[in-house]
Amino acid sequence: MPNIAYTPAVYNVKMVAGDTFSETFTFTDGDGAAVSLEGYTFTSQLRRTAGGTAIANMTITGDTTQVTRSLGTAVTADLSGDYVHDMQWITPLNEVRTLLAGTFKVVAEVTR
């Protein structure tokens, strides 16, 4: 019997406090074709530790082929130090899969 791992991709982020955080993902199949995201929803949070309180819920936008997660400057201005994050998708059948997870480091800004 084959081994199957449902572990998320390790995805570490480093950014500057007070900057806009925004990134867009396109999901593709094994042939490189975009996967339809119709009916899927996404969620992404920032926490100090995996079991800790949510510090921020990322804004999720998208269409049928791409999803963007972001944090505005009003949120990132108050961040400092080390966090953890992940991004999950929920299928039309309410199945949850964590796609990526990792560290989220926020360094101090200089220009204000």
Image (cartoon, helix red, strand yellow):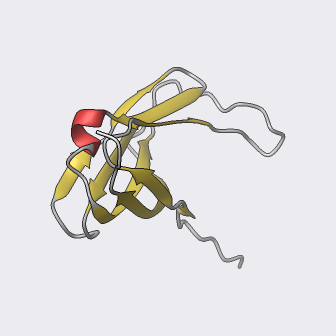
Location of the N terminus (image quadrant): bottom right
| Residue positioned most to the front | 111
Residue plotted at (42% across, 50% down): 87
Residue plotted at (52% across, 20% down): 63
Res 65 → quadrant? top right
Res 40 → quadrant? top left
Location of the C terminus (image quadrant): top left
Q: Is residue 40 left or right of residue 9?
A: left
Q: Position of residue 13 (x, y in %)?
A: 48, 57
Residue plotted at (80% across, 38% down): 32
Q: How many marks?
A: 0
Above or below 27: residue 104? below
Q: Is residue 74 left or right of residue 93?
A: left
Q: Position of residue 43 (x, y in %)?
A: 35, 42
Of 2 and 14, which appears nearest the observer? 14
Q: Position of residue 73 (x, y in %)?
A: 29, 35
Whether residue 92 is visible to the viewer of this picture, yes or no, is no
Above or below 86: residue 71? above
